[in-house]
Image: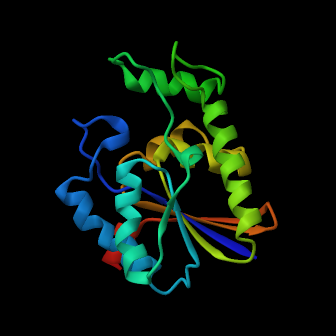
Amino acid sequence: MTAVYFIRHAEKNPKSEDSDAPLTDKGLADRSLVTAYLCDKNIDVVLSSPYKRSVDTVSEFAQQAGLEVQAIYDFRERRISSKWIDDFKSYAVNQWADFSYKLEDGESLHEVQERNIAALQEALRQHNGKNIVVGTHGTSLSTIIRYFDATYGFADFMAMAHIMPWVVKMEFDGVCCVGIEKIDLFQLAAD
């Protein structure tokens, strides 16, 4: 059995370039929730989107565990467009209603899902039977969940939109997903 802990990044600075957006002070503080959660999970490998916010969210844990963060390009977030979108919610509704919907130079959710699933399947082959951390993003993670759970939709995406960081644990037998557990670190810390 392989366990994959997908870690949606902590709060990022919204005024920075997407791939280089650092964590806010709150995000830097909140990543300690990730470190505390993962400390007893016997993690063997830490993978991440190459985006700074994802790497920074899992790097504190990796350093403490004596592991290197390995950046995997295909775990990156979707490309929306090079143009500003005034009504992001309508755009997101359109994408969830039609997984092939995209803007002129952006990616569809289907394209995001395809490359994230390919990266996941490669990680599962390389690290079969291990405990894996993957630093990721809200949309990327949502398309992965949707791949294994067709009932996951726009309402679920919006429900987690402001939970940063957020954890989803998936268990795999080979490349077959046999379990999905969503973990709210803020709720765990409050209990």
Where's residue 86, x and y in %? 32, 17
- Vertical order, 102 against 2 (above or below): above
Tag count: 0
- Vertical order, 63 against 179 (above or below): below
Where's residue 4, x and y in %? 62, 67
Q: What's the image's color scheme?
A: rainbow
- Vertical order, 33 against 157 (above or below): below
Q: Report whether 37 appears left or right of 154.
A: left
Question: Which residue ends up furthest to the top in the rendered image?
Answer: 104
- The quarter holding residue 34 reads bottom left
Q: Report whether 98 appears left or right of 173.
A: left
| Quarter of the figure with the N terminus | bottom right
Q: Residue at x 63, y 50 (%)?
A: 145
Residue 152 visible: no
- Vertical order, 21 against 170 (above or below): above
Where's residue 101, x and y in %? 60, 20
Q: Report whether 162 appears left or right of 65.
A: left
Q: Residue at x 36, y 50 (%)?
A: 52
Q: Residue at x 51, y 44 (%)?
A: 76
Residue 61 visible: yes
- The quarter holding residue 184 reads bottom left
Q: Residue at x 44, y 50 (%)?
A: 160
| Quarter of the figure with the C terminus | bottom left
**188 and 134: which is toward the camera:** 134
Where's residue 121, x and y in %? 74, 55
